[in-house]
Image (tube, grey):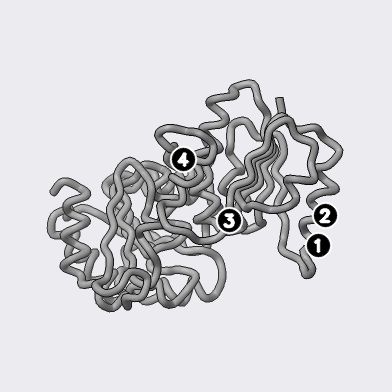
Amino acid sequence: MRILFITSSRIGDAVISCGILEGLRLQYPQARFTIACGTVAEGVFARFPALERLIAFEKESFDRHWLRLWFKLAPRVWEIVVDVRGSALSLLLVARKRYILKGGRRPGRRYVQLGTALGFAPPPLPVAWTGPADDAKASALLGNGPVIALAPTANWEGKIWPARRFIDLFHELRTKVPDARAAVFGGPGAMEAALAEPVLRALPDAINLVGRLSLPEAAACLRRSCLFVGNDSGLMHLAAATGTPTLGLFGRSKASEYAPAGTRTAVVIAPGAEGEAPMAGLSVEAVATAAFGLLGL
């Protein structure tokens, strides 16, 4: 049995879709999966246990990437096609059953929308898959003792809490977790490095993981952390999917749609209209209080 799963080019949205992907794997334990996603997100699925083929593609002008993808997928008859991007491509493939989920922004938690569309009740939470090598690397990097994961970066300036407040927050958290070390996470590239640099400079003992990990390795490191605090980003969603206590910070994005989905999560929302409030409105005290509550301290 072969199932095709077409999902997002963004890391956060790709992670959110992992809940229904895992649900399908458990529902059809003999199935083999082909997953098509954007190149940035391919690491999200690299350790998926039932993976037969992973197709990563870049967006091209005039939607030529969809045509290239169709040529790769059309020769096969699919038992099930699941397309969380709502593309027309899925209608042009031979499939015994298909789920073409509506794309675009709309009210409600995205993981709930996906789960409901496939008939899961309750909607499955996102998961993150890692391998033995990823877990071994995480153990070597983080060592023993509690680690607090900080993610001061995001793909848009409006989502970013000031770096100085991440620094002050960590010092506040250490008043109750005195032996904790900080691990600073971020993606590859000069922009991510620049956003994380003030935090790393102010916390010289922090573990610098900015741009140094694959997504499965990042998931393994996040799973070993005792707490994650970060802006609304792919890393936030990945942390929640690992089961780590995850605190998401929101201002100019909507927690009602994209709050972290996991077994132990919370959000702190800047005062003001949802999706329009400046992140500078979030105080260190409010975030620390939420973090202590998440840790049961």
For marks 2 and 3, the one nearer the N-term is: 2
* Horizontal relation, residue 44 to residue 4: left or right: left
State which mark lies toward you, 4 or 2. Answer: 2
**Can you identify the residue that label 1 sits on?**
64
Residue at horizontal 40%, vertical 34%? 122
* Horizontal relation, residue 14 to residue 58: left or right: left
Q: Could you tell me which secondary element the residue under label 2 belongs to? A: helix
Q: Quadrant of residue 73?
A: top right
For marks 4 and 3, the one nearer the N-term is: 3
Label 2, label 1: how many angstroms apart (C-alpha)?
6 Å
Q: Please state the horizontal and vertical placement of residue 220, each as a whole percent of the image.
A: 45, 44
**What amino acid is labelled 2 in the image?**
Arg
Badge 4: how crowded within 10 Å, few (<14), some, or many (20+)?
many
- For residue 200, say whether it is visible: no
**What amino acid is labelled 3 in the image?**
Gly
Badge 2: how crowded within 10 Å, few (<14), some, or many (20+)?
few
- For residue 180, say whether it is visible: yes
Q: Quadrant of residue 223?
A: top left
For marks 4 and 2, the one nearer the N-term is: 2
Task: Report the number of discs.
Answer: 4
Label 4, label 2: how many angstroms apart (C-alpha)?
29 Å
**Can you identify the residue that label 3 sits on?**
103
* Horizontal relation, residue 75 to residue 24: left or right: right
**Can you identify the residue that label 4 sits on?**
127
Label 4, label 3: how many angstroms apart (C-alpha)?
21 Å
State which mark lies toward you, 1 or 4. Answer: 1
Q: Between 14 and 151, which is closer to the camera in this rendering?
A: 14
Contact, mark 2 vs mark 1 (Cβ under 8 Å): yes
**What amino acid is labelled 1 in the image?**
Arg
**Can you identify the residue that label 2 sits on?**
68
Q: Could you tell me which secondary element the residue under label 4 belongs to? A: loop
